[in-house]
Image (cartoon, grey):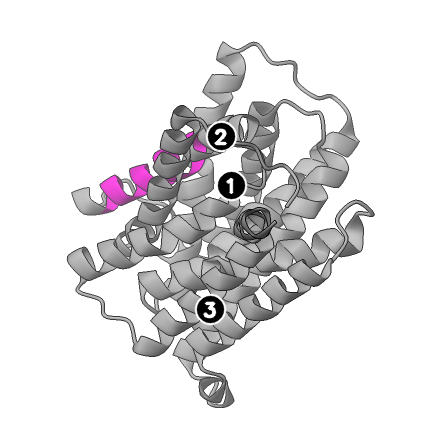
């Protein structure tokens, strides 16, 4: 996998921190949905996160992009990376467990490999990657249970919605590489979230009514967590880990997030996943390990 580096203890610590933060986001979103509508919860997420990141942009005196083309790129990025996946996944969490949502979320890496191979000449789909992708899709199919999709009930549709969100994330990754390369990451994140907020705030107001600040304390804690910590701070930490560890090592997050989310869901929400979901994650994790490639390379070195 391109972008792999050896991990320092500090890089490991920050990668684990990022994984735990993102793993906790699934629980916080589900808690907020007890009181907020799907669109309103997403509007809170992108709105507050955008405000925090603009404080960072101003504090660092980063230059504001003036080209309309850049702001159009922010809008598309916001739709692909925030508006569509956040909404699909939040709706999905109304009908499936937080742990299962986190397992299906790992499909982002599988779609990312396929779309990168299509979009970029330096990201070819090698036989090893093809095996990893195949196992990834087998894992998702196992977790969902293909027979369940014939019913198209809310639970099956929710699982498809989450997978649709992961495809949108993968599209966003390709779009960012094509249009936002070289942009300061803090500015890119602030611009993307601002565009997302400009879409979600009026949409949520129209579909779910005016916003209210009279929310339960648990809801505000949940919103604060997933907006400020799991979105604004996590974006800043993500780019920091990316610089230290490389893009290949960030795939490790995909393997760490589900156990965190599953554990929190079991402890706080008393969730219990089916054996099929665990089996699906095991197969998906194997696919991700093969995509990562380092274990295979280590085995080859030991046999030489």
Q: Secondary structure at mark 2?
A: helix
Q: Which residue is mark 2?
A: 241
Which of the two discs, 1 and 3, sits closer to the camera? 3
**Residue occupied by mark 3:** 283
Residue at disc 1, secondary structure: loop
- As drawn, the label of residue 250 is 1
Label 1 near label 2: C-beta < 8 Å? yes
In the image, the segment drawn in magenta is 219-233
Residue drawn at the location 49% of the way across and 33% of the way down: 238
Side of 92 where 268 appears, left or right: left
Q: Is residue 77 left or right of residue 13?
A: right
**Mark 2, mark 3: which one is toward the viewer?**
3
Q: Nearer the viewer, residue 9 or 166?
A: 9
Distance (Cα) linking label 2 and label 3: 27 Å
Q: Are marks 1 and 3 in contact (CB under 8 Å)?
A: no
- Identify the residue at the far right of this view: 121
Q: Residue 164, how many percent across, how many down?
A: 56, 64
Q: CA distance from mark 2 to mark 1?
A: 8 Å
Residue at the far front in the pictured view: 304
* Circle 1 residues within 10 Å: few <14, some 14–19, many ≥20: many
- Of label 1 and label 3, which has the lower sequence position? 1
Note whether residue 302 is visible: yes
**Left or right of residue 267, residue 293 in this image:** right
Q: Residue at x 44, y 26 (%)?
A: 8
């Amino acid at each position: 996998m391109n972008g792999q580096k050896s991990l320092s203890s500090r890089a490991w610590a920050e990668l684990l921190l990022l994984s735990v933060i993102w793993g906790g986001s699934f629980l916080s979103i589900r808690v907020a949905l007890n009181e907020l509508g799907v669109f309103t919860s997403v509007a809170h997420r992108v709105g507050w996160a955008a405000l925090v990141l603009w404080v960072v942009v101003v504090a660092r005196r980063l230059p504001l992009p003036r080209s309309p083309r850049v702001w159009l790129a922010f809008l598309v990025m916001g739709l692909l990376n925030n508006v569509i996946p956040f909404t699909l996944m939040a709706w999905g969490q109304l009908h499936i467990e937080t742990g299962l949502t986190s397992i299906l979320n790992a499909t982002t890496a599988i779609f990312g490999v396929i779309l990168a191979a299509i979009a970029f000449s330096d990201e070819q789909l090698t036989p090893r990657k093809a095996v990893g992708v195949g196992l990834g899709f087998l894992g998702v199919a196992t977790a969902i249970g293909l027979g369940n999709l014939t019913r198209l009930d809310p639970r099956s549709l929710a699982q498809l919605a989450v997978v649709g969100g992961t495809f949108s994330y993968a599209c966003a990754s390709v779009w960012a590489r094509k249009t936002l390369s070289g942009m300061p990451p803090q500015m890119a994140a602030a611009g993307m979230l601002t565009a997302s907020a400009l879409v979600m705030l009026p949409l949520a107001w129209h579909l779910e009514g005016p916003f209210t600040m009279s929310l339960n304390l648990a809801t505000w804690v949940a919103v604060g967590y997933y907006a400020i910590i799991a979105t604004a701070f996590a974006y800043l930490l993500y780019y920091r880990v990316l610089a230290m560890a490389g893009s290949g090592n960030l795939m490790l997050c995909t393997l760490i997030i589900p156990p965190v989310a599953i554990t929190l869901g079991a402890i706080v929400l008393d969730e219990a996943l089916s054996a099929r979901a665990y089996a699906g994650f095991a197969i998906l994790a194997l696919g991700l390990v093969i995509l990562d490639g380092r274990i295979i390379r280590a085995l080859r070195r030991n046999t030489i």
